Image: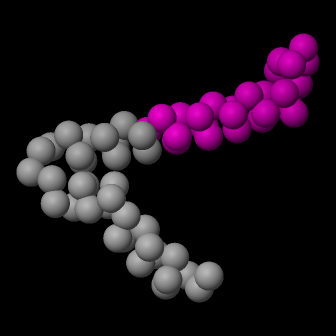
Amino acid sequence: MAVPAFLETIERSGLSTWIRESESAYAYYFVLVIHNIGLALLVGTCGVLGARLLGFVPEL
């Protein structure tokens, strides 16, 4: 699947339509919260792996 076709599929999804056309502020905050949770998981994992590689937490 080509990248433009994939992006169009995402754009036409129900979730994208809900976020784009919603009158409620919850749509924006829903995406913001999910994004922040994912970012926290990524940064936390990198922090734990970095601490392990640097020898700060050898028991991991």
Q: Is 60 situated above or below 41? A: above
Q: Quadrant of residue 45?
A: top right
Q: Is 29 situated above or below 3? A: above
In x, y percent, where is residue 17?
A: 26, 62
Q: Is 8 situated above or below 20? A: below
Tell me the residue at 59%/34% (across/down): 41
Q: Quadrant of the N terminus?
A: bottom right
Tell me the residue at 70%/38% (across/down): 46
Tell me the residue at 44%/73% (across/down): 9
Between 49 and 3, which is closer to the camera in this rendering? 3
Q: Quadrant of the C terminus?
A: top right
In x, y percent, where is residue 38?
A: 52, 40
Q: Judge from the rendering whether residue 41 lies leftward or rightward of residue 27; answer left or right.
A: right
The magenta stretch spans which residues? 36-60
Q: Is residue 20 magenta?
A: no
Q: State the residue lying farthest toward the top.
A: 59
Q: Judge from the rendering whether residue 10 lies leftward or rightward of residue 27; answer left or right.
A: right
Q: Please count the marks in the image.
A: 0
Q: Judge from the rendering whether residue 16 lies leftward or rightward of residue 43; answer left or right.
A: left
In x, y percent, where is residue 11?
A: 36, 70
Q: State the residue lying farthest toward the front.
A: 14
Between 13 and 54, which is closer to the camera in this rendering? 13
Q: State the residue lying farthest toward the left.
A: 23
